[in-house]
Every structure is written in structure tokens, then in C-alpha cells.
Image (spheres, grey):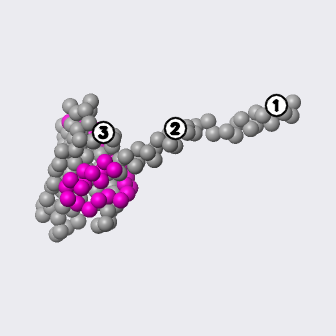
Amino acid sequence: MKFLLGLLLTISMVNTNAKPSEAITRPRLQNQQLWVLQQAILQMGLPVPTQINLIETGYYTNGRVATVYYESSRGEEMVSIFQPTANFTLDGGKIYKCLGDVCDCKNLNTVNADGTVSVSCTCTSCTMVVNEFLQAEIFF
């Protein structure tokens, strides 16, 4: 009886929510996301990201947006990755980055009254750089 009680107590202490495959997959996915982001930013001629801090995603009528906050030699930066609804079965999208020296240029994702989203810059003196982004799917 003591053996059975001890066995039940031991089994109840095991974390049944832990999934070893998730623990292995998540760092691999984060490394892939960083590599993909580095390639996209290099194409834009900007300092290479060294670490992804946060990815926020939103789903809208005309597509989905991933706002990626990352570290580079210039400090924390951000880009918006937009994937139109029509491309959900594909991997393509666009990457948006606001640039400027006058203000602290940031991307601004605006949800319109019709449920669509548009990407713009926080300051009028900023320039929006837009590139095709063939590996957008990895951020959603």
C-alpha cells in the first residue's frame, strides 16, 4: 500500500504540460526568424539585427501584420511585416521600415474603419522604405 501511495504521489508531481518537442522547436524557430530578418534588413542597407525582442501580430480584413522589435548597433528598432490575405497560402509579403534623422521614426500600424490595416510613419519627416519580403510566413 505504501508503495502504491508513493508511486501515485510521484506520478502526480510530473509536469504533464511540458512538451519536449516545443522546448526544442521554439529556439530553432527564433533563430530562423532572426536569420530571415537579418537577410531582409541587409537588403534594405540597414544595420543587421542582433536579437529579436518581441513579435506582435494582428489579423485584419486585408491581411496580417507582424510588428518585430529588434536590437541592432543603433539600439532598439522595429519593422512591420505585412502579408496580404491573398498570400496566406504563399510565403510572400512586404517589410516596412521608417527612416529619418529629425525624429524618432517608428512604424505606425493603423486599423481603418473597414477593418483593414495600413502602415505609415509616426513623423512626416520620415521616409518609408518598403521591400518585397519572400519569407513573411515565419513571423505568423
Residue identifier under label 3: 137
Residue identifier under label 1: 4
The extreme bottom residue here reads: 102
Residue at 41% x, 44% y: name it. Answer: 29
Residue 43, x across and y down, in percent:
21, 53
Residue 50, x across and y down, in percent:
35, 59
Residue 9, x across and y down, in percent:
76, 37
Are the residues flagged by discs 1 and 3 in contact, CB closer than 8 Å?
Answer: no
Q: Residues within 10 Å of mark 3 (few under 14, many from 20)?
A: some
Is residue 34 in the magenta section? no
Observer able to see residue 135: yes
Residue 67, x across and y down, in percent:
29, 49
User: Which tag, 1 or 2, sits closer to the chain's start?
Assistant: 1
User: Which tag, 1 or 3, sits closer to the chain's start?
Assistant: 1
Residue identifier under label 2: 21
**Quadrant in which residue 102 is drawn:** bottom left
Horizontally, residue 31 falls left or right of residue 20, namely left
Residue at 26% x, 36% y: name it. Answer: 91
Q: Residues within 10 Å of mark 2 (few under 14, many from 20)?
A: few
Amino acid type, label 2: Ser
Amino acid type, label 3: Glu
**Quadrant in which residue 11 is drawn:** top right
